[in-house]
Amino acid sequence: MQNRPMLEAADVAQMMAAAEAEASRQGWAVTIAICDDGGHLLGLKRLDGVAPVSVYIAPEKARTAALGRRDSAVYERMINEGRVSFLSAPILAGMLEGGVPVTVGGHVVGAVGVSGVKSNEDAQIARAAVAALG
């Protein structure tokens, strides 16, 4: 039997604070979602001024990154490069840049998804959240 690390509430709070701080530094209104390795939502914060649809997009980006064990941008690139059949992949609905997996000790323990600004800016905020864990 294997043992692996898991995200705890304190980890989620630490990542959420880092993501919110990065968004604030940049003046960006976004929604931040953090999920566990199974794509189950652990934290969600919608900052003032962000479009309501971002509340649906951010968790899907996080879920896609967690279940796929890779940045959600990988799927966006595959589709943009012509592999449109990947749009029919079951469960993965956030195949847009802005979802970043959280890896600890070689194990994906969750992911952060961000929505509200340009995709590369969403990813920048998500990476800031992941970096907060060290």
Image (spheres, rainbow, N blue to C red):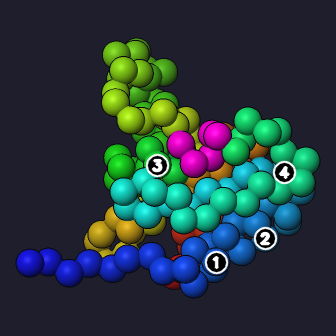
* Quarter-of-image position of residue 14: bottom right
Identify the secondary structure beneath mark 2. helix
| Percent of width and height locating residue 33 | 61, 56
Label at residue 112: none
On the image, numbered disc 2 is attached to which residue?
Answer: 21
- Residue at (40%, 16%) from the top-left corner? 84
Mark 4 near mark 3, Cβ–Cβ under 8 Å? Answer: no
Q: Measured from the top left, where is residue 114 in percent x and y?
A: 65, 51
Other-residue count near label 1 (Cα within 10 Å), few / some / many at <14 / 14–19 / ≥20: some
Q: Is residue 18 magenta?
A: no
The boundaries of the magenta stretch are 56-60
Q: Amino acid at mark 2?
A: Ala
Is the magenta region chiefly helix, strand or loop? helix
Q: Which label is found at residue 63?
A: 3
The residue type indicated by label 4 comes to Ala
- Can you tell which of label 4 and label 1 is closer to the viewer? 1
The mark that comes first in sequence, 4 or 2, is 2
**Disc 4 marks which residue?**
29
Between the C-alphas of marks 3 and 1, the distance is 18 Å
The answer to which of marks 4 and 1 sits earlier in the sequence is: 1
Mark 1–mark 2 Cα distance, whole angstroms, equals 12 Å
* Residue shown at the point (52%, 37%) measured from the top left: 94
* Mark 1, residue position: 13
CA gap, disc 4 and disc 2: 11 Å
